[in-house]
Structure formats: structure tokens, C-alpha cells
């Protein structure tokens, strides 16, 4: 399957199910400020104005959702700085993102399975991370890389859940059986490669703002690239009720279909 054929098939899949496609603007004066996502910037020389390229379609989709509570999706070029370039990471890539109002994480997983199986005839398993995970990002990433990723199936799809809430400020935080706070979120691995991640959306404006401000301070202290925080994005999130969404890397997904 070619990229053109896949994009055509994806659009048909969502249109036939009543989704609205949202156009994503590429020049933004501000963006959400999430950990590990560093935006490219460009300048409108005539006006001496700085813009930032989207790291995901989420800002545009959340704006649409806050104004029109309906199923929606976007296919967008995304740009991420400070990442290695290899067969799995590129500074520019295509992302598919979709949102389901009034759907919880179980509903989202069910929909995602159906979407993937439309293109790939595979089986799925679910893997829940153990409790008492490292409570800082660096240690968690090392733990996940060494202890979890090597154990994931190399064939078929695996939904990984149970991630600590601090890793995902835009996912709804929930308590687990051990009293810890985890993110209402999954990562989908297919044949051992991360393909997508999804969550129930966090609609608490105060917690999102606090997370963005903490990331802002972290970047200042560590002399990392910083862009203006989109206060509009925080407002869009606060207007949502129950809503869940998925981001899927089209380039990685296409490689599975070749």
C-alpha cells in the first residue's frame, strides 16, 4: 500500500463513521507546552513575528471540540525538534489524531482495535504496568526501556496501560487499586514498535496550567528551547466533558502494511 492509498483509506474510514475532518494550521503564535516535545520556530520577516510549527494536531482538534461536540479527526504534518533521526524518528512526520466524545478508555481501545484491524488482521493483548513505578521521568524511562519494552510481544498488538500520571498531564488522572495516581491512557505497540497513544482527556484547567508552568520552569533551569504557552488550549480543554482521543503515527503504520 502506498502513502496516498493509505491516506485515502483512512479518510474514507472516518467519513463513513460520521467524523468531521479538521484542518490544522501550521503557523502558531503559541502551543501546548508538554514534556519532551520541542517545537520548531520560524519567523515572518516582514512583520518580525515568530511562529511555531505544531508538534501534533491536538490544538486545532481541541478548539474544534470545544465549539462543536462531535467526532473529529485530522491528518497533519507534525514537527519535533531535539529528536534523533532514524527509521523510527524524524523531525517531520505525518500524524492521524481522532477524538470520541462521551467515550471512556475501554471504548477508545475497542474503537482503535477496529480501526487497526481494518488494515491489519492481527490479535491484541493488554499489558498493565506494575504498581510502585519510579516517580521521576528519567528513572521511569530507563525502567521501561530495560524491563518492559523487551518483554512486549514482537507479533500482534499490545495495549500498555498503567502509566504514572505525572508523565501525561493531558490525560485524565485516576486512582488505581494501590492508591497511586495513574493516567487514564494507553500506548499501542504493534510488533514491538510504538504506533499510537490514546487517553481520556484531562479537562481540569488548573492542573493543565500547573503542568505547563512546571515544564516552563524546568526548561528555563536546563536552558532548553521554550515557546509561549497556549492559554487558549487550556480553555478549550476546560470546556470538554468526557472525551477520549488517539494519536497514531502514519509513517510507522504504513511500514506495517508494506
Image (cartoon, rainbow, N blue to C red):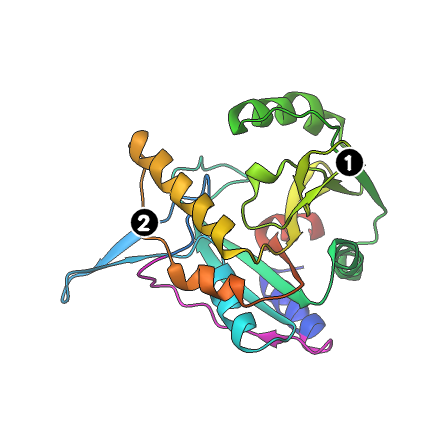
| Residue tagged 1 | 128
Q: Is residue 10 magenta?
A: no
Q: Judge from the rendering whether residue 48 lies leftward or rightward of residue 103; answer left or right.
A: left
Relative image position of residue 238 (x, y in whole percent)? 52, 63
| Residue tagged 2 | 227
Q: Is residue 20 visible?
A: yes
Mark 1, other Cα within 10 Å: few <14 / some 14–19 / many ≥20: few
Q: Judge from the rendering whether residue 82 lies leftward or rightward of residue 67; answer left or right.
A: left
Label 1 – label 2 distance at C-alpha: 34 Å
Image point 58% across, 51% down: which residue? 251
Front residue of 165 and 30: 165
Q: Is residue 20 magenta?
A: yes
Q: Main secondary structure of the magenta part?
A: loop
Mark 1 falls on what kind of element?
strand
Residue range of the region highlighted in magenta in the rendering: 15-30
Relative image position of residue 211 (x, y in whole percent)? 46, 44
Image point 54% across, 27% down: which residue? 136
Q: Mark on residue 83?
A: none
Image point 44% across, 35% down: which residue? 84
Front residue of 7 and 219: 219
Relative image position of residue 72 (x, y in whole percent)? 61, 71
Q: Which quarter of the rendered picture does the N terminus lie within?
A: bottom right
Mark 2 falls on what kind of element?
loop
Front residue of 11 and 97: 97
Relative image position of residue 105 (x, y in whole percent)? 74, 54
Q: Earlier in the sequence, mark 1 or mark 2?
A: 1
Amino acid at each position: 500500500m502506498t502513502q496516498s492509498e493509505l491516506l485515502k483509506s483512512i479518510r474514507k474510514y472516518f467519513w463513513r463513521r460520521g467524523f468531521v475532518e479538521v484542518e490544522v494550521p501550521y503557523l502558531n503564535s503559541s502551543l501546548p507546552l508538554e514534556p519532551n516535545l520541542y517545537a520548531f520556530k520560524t519567523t515572518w520577516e516582514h512583520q518580525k513575528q515568530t511562529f511555531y510549527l505544531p508538534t501534533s494536531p491536538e490544538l486545532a482538534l481541541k478548539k474544534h471540540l470545544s465549539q462543536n461536540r462531535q467526532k473529529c479527526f485530522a491528518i497533519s504534518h507534525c514537527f519535533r525538534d531535539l529528536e534523533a533521526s532514524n527509521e523510527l524518528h524524524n523531525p517531520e512526520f505525518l500524524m492521524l489524531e481522532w477524538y470520541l466524545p462521551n467515550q471512556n478508555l475501554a471504548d477508545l481501545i475497542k474503537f482503535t482495535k477496529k480501526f487497526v484491524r481494518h488494515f491489519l488482521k492481527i490479535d491484541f493483548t493488554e499489558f498493565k504496568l506494575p504498581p510502585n513505578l519510579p516517580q521521576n521521568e528519567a528513572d521511569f524511562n530507563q525502567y521501561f526501556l530495560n524491563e518492559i519494552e523487551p518483554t512486549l510481544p514482537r507479533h500482534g498488538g499490545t495495549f500498555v496501560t498503567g502509566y504514572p500520571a505525572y508523565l501525561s498531564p493531558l490525560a485524565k488522572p485516576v486512582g488505581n487499586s494501590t492508591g497511586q495516581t495513574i493516567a487514564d491512557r494507553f500506548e499501542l505497540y504493534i510488533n514491538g514498535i510504538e504506533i499510537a497513544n490514546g487517553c481520556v482527556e484531562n479537562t481540569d484547567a488548573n492542573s493543565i496550567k500547573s503542568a505547563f508552568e512546571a515544564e516552563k520552569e524546568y526548561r528555563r533551569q536546563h536552558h532548553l528551547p521554550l515557546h509561549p504557552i497556549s492559554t487558549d488550549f487550556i480553555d478549550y480543554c476546560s470546556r470538554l466533558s468526557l472525551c477520549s482521543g488517539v494519536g497514531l503515527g502514519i509513517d510507522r503504520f504504513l511500514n506495517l502494511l508494506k
